[in-house]
Each structure stands twice: as structure tokens, then as C-alpha cells.
Image (cartoon, grey):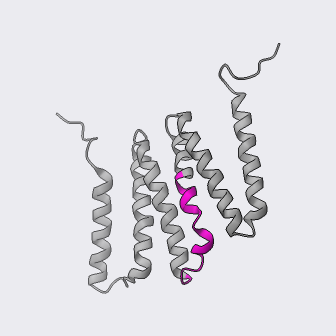
Amino acid sequence: MGDGTSRPVVPGLILIVLGVLFLLGNFGALDLDWGILWTWILILIGAIFWLGFIFDRSKDGLIMPGTVLLVAGVVFNVSARYDWAPLEDLWPFFILAPALGFYLIYLLGKRDRGVLVPAIILTIVGIVFLMGTSSVLRWLGPVIMIGIGALILLSRGTGGAGGRGEE
């Protein structure tokens, strides 16, 4: 007798939502402009991955694809709406998306510190590229890097043999 938890919820939800969207488009109830619609499909699929995690917290593997698809969908959506010009400045978010996914896996998952290494590396690389593409981030990027560095140093002092103790 099965417990019903092993059923694939996310693929089923994706197919149902896409089917409803295309059905509404076929009946003229929804204007399906493919030039923008595909970006919303990415956002929707990312949200469905996140819903899969929210409803079953043991499936923290859904966080990464959900986060990457949400970020990519938003970047593509903004870019598509403005003749793709913003992509010239926004492309580093494709590097930062998995970094954010790793941070969220750490914060919401099993607290495996191993995921922080690629998160930090991707964050640094992404911020460096953002600093080169955006005038705002030329000053905000270093501030973010200082903040992340401070968080790393502060986290070393909590719990564990490496922390400083009072004598």
C-alpha cells in the first residue's frame, strides 16, 4: 500500500497549466504573443518548482531549478518588453541565479555548507560582471561584496570548533 507521496506533482502541474493556457489561446480568450509568452512560461514553471518545494519541504532539490527559471524568466521578460536592450546589462543575473539557488538551498534545506562555496564564487563572478555593465552597481557591487564577506566572517564565529571562546 503506497503512501502517495512519490507521485510527480510538478510535471503534472506544469502540463495542466500549459494546457489551460494554450486552450484559452485557441478559443481567443487569451492573446498568446509568443514573443512574451515564453518568458511567462519560464516564470510559471519556476513558480511550480517552488510550489513543489513549499508543499514538500523534503524536496529541496526543487529550489535550484525553480530559482534559475524564475530569474531567467524575469530577465527575459523585461528584456523582451524593451526590444532586448536591457539584456546588455542584465545578463550577469544568469550567473547570479544559481548563486541565489545555492543560498536558498542552504537557508531552506539541510544547511549543508558545501553549497555555500559555489554560491559565493558565483556571487563574486556575477557581481564583478554587473559592476562592469551597470553604473549603479559600480558602487553597489563592492558594498554587497563587503557585506557578504562580513557575513562569512561572522558566521565562522558561531557554533563549531573554529569559533572564538571566552577565557
Left or right: residue 151 versus residue 51 is: right
Q: Residue at x 60, y 69 (%)?
A: 90
The image quarter containing residue 97 is bottom right
- Tell me residue 37's x, y (percent): 41, 77
Q: Is residue 156 above or below residue 42?
A: above
Residue at coordinates 53% horizontally, 81% vertically from top-left? Answer: 81
Relative side of 135 to 38, left or right: right
Query: Who's the residue at 72% across and 40% down the image?
Result: 151
- Which of the 4 quarters of the picture holds residue 44? bottom left
Q: Is residue 13 left or right of residue 39?
A: left
Residue 86: say if magenta: yes
Q: Residue at x 77, y 48 (%)?
A: 146
68 vs 41, nearest the viewer: 68
Work out which residue is located at the far right of the displayed protein and give it.
167
User: In the image, residue 1 lies at what x, y percent?
Assistant: 16, 33
Number of numbered discs: 0
Residue 131: percent from left, percent from top? 71, 63
Q: Compared with residue 141, is residue 25 higher up or lower down, i.e. above or below? A: below
Q: Which residues are magenta?
A: 82-98
